[in-house]
Image (cartoon, coloured by chain):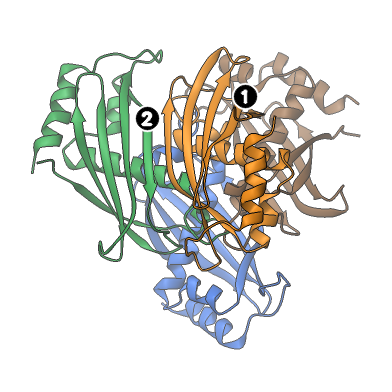
Chain colours: A brown, B blue, C orange, D green
Amino acid sequence: MQPKHEIDIRVRYAEVDQMGVVHHARYFEYFEMGRTEALRACGLNYRDIEEAGYFLVITKVTCAFKMPARYDDILTLETWIEKLTRLRIDHAYRLWRDEKRQLVAEAASTLGCVDRNGQLREMPADLLDLFGKASRQE
Amino acid sequence: MQPKHEIDIRVRYAEVDQMGVVHHARYFEYFEMGRTEALRACGLNYRDIEEAGYFLVITKVTCAFKMPARYDDILTLETWIEKLTRLRIDHAYRLWRDEKRQLVAEAASTLGCVDRNGQLREMPADLLDLFGKASRQE
Amino acid sequence: MQPKHEIDIRVRYAEVDQMGVVHHARYFEYFEMGRTEALRACGLNYRDIEEAGYFLVITKVTCAFKMPARYDDILTLETWIEKLTRLRIDHAYRLWRDEKRQLVAEAASTLGCVDRNGQLREMPADLLDLFGKASRQE
Amino acid sequence: MQPKHEIDIRVRYAEVDQMGVVHHARYFEYFEMGRTEALRACGLNYRDIEEAGYFLVITKVTCAFKMPARYDDILTLETWIEKLTRLRIDHAYRLWRDEKRQLVAEAASTLGCVDRNGQLREMPADLLDLFGKASRQE
């Protein structure tokens, strides 16, 4: 059972389009915040990872939009690691409104690891260990 | 055979993140531009559609990122309608660099039609006809 | 003496450009958050104001960037009302890093009030009263 | 007399907020495009400048918003160099709608030159020369 990490996000005015709903591109910023905070919750800092010369790049995303979110809404984002190998980290996300009674979006992303030159490479063992702990811990 | 509509997009400085590559969320703005221009190419204007009270909302997106794009790159975006029913429009996209020698991203999206109150509804016959023509014309 | 309202903002990855610093356009989203939260702190909700048919539009901004902010920094934003008339609200902002030891940016903005048709108009007395209280309260 | 460089910009759907007008933060992306293209018009490429180790950072902006711009509008942006010294480049901008009959925004920005470590420094003579030519040429 993967632990799910939760954060709350207040919708900004600038994130809403002329239909009065959060623009779909903006959700990917939320998911990125979810990854950053899920990492931090298990003692990892993505900034440190980049400073060590490893860069995690998005290679695939998918998102189903179930219900609109609006300016000033407080959303709850759940983030968890679905699968972890030396070559990729698959995250999944659920974004809720109204104390998790309304599902706003469900999404998934795949990260690959690249070096400073943008070449895909295996994650170093220590980084993999830390992610592994993150994806198991309760 | 669906006609593919092409536009060129110059990458803006503001679209690039600290890895020096276009941030993945920004690609969805490009695909939206692709839809707008593909519509226009067959005589439809999305602004007019909204003014008539129909709103096309994204219900699903998926994107595979194949290769980074950088500031000041000129990208070529192909957009086409993959499937069309009264309830949904499925678009597909290919984004290229360097005169289509390097594939940057492949994506797909699904649009549903909602009214001013955000309720999903069938597309009106005349709108459907126009999209139908768009997806067949050469 | 105007009361200053403070919020903390965690810099998102998507907000940082290829120099590794927050892109200057993104600061204006922060200032907008500052206005929303300063309003809320004195019992006003900007969403309610719009629903009542009044829209506050930015007519002028100015910002001096003193020092870069980086991904994952926690910034402290001070927002206050500098001047208030029936026709305009002038806000001022200071954005800090590192427990207010480093000034990141200083800014000012002017809001005008428009109706649903985009015509500039005087603020209604009750709204003005509320802003007046907001700009005096300790 | 400074030469003014012009570009056309089609407003993207993602740039418009729930008032149906371009969000004020987005204008600064337009001005940045104006600077990039004004440079290119006189034979300079900002990407090359960064690759040579010089970074031009925004130290101040100001913008007056005169009239809203809407989704799908084609805007005309004029960009020119107002003042040039070894330490700063001041640009000015005018953004128009409808074949320059309606002024949307007037703005100004100041750029400083920093090295890879973010330290402010004088612009190198050759770069200054090129900007000088840019600001004089017809």
| Chain of residue at mark 2 | D
Res. D136 image quadrant: top left
Residue B5: x, y in percent? 42, 66
Q: Residue at x 46, y 62 (%)?
A: D71
- Secondary structure at badge 1 equals strand
Residue type at mark 2? Answer: Lys
Q: Is residue A79 visible?
A: yes
User: Which residue corresponds to the image point at 26% horizontal and 24% vertical from the top-left?
Assistant: D88
Residue B10 shows up from this direction: no
Mark number, residue C76 = 1
- Label count reads 2
**Label 1 sits on what residue type?**
Thr
The residue pinned by badge 2 equals D60
Q: Residue at x 26, y 52 (%)?
A: D7
Q: In the picture shown, does residue A91 fall above or below B103?
A: above
Q: Between marks 1 and 2, how big is the CA–CA gap? A: 20 Å
Q: Nearer the viewer, residue C29 or A41?
A: C29
Q: Residue at x 41, y 78 (%)?
A: B43
Q: Residues within 10 Å of mark 1 (few under 14, many from 20)?
A: many
The chain that hosts pointer 1 is: C
| Relative image position of residue C51 (x, y in whole percent) | 68, 61
| CB atoms of marks 1 and 2 within 8 Å | no
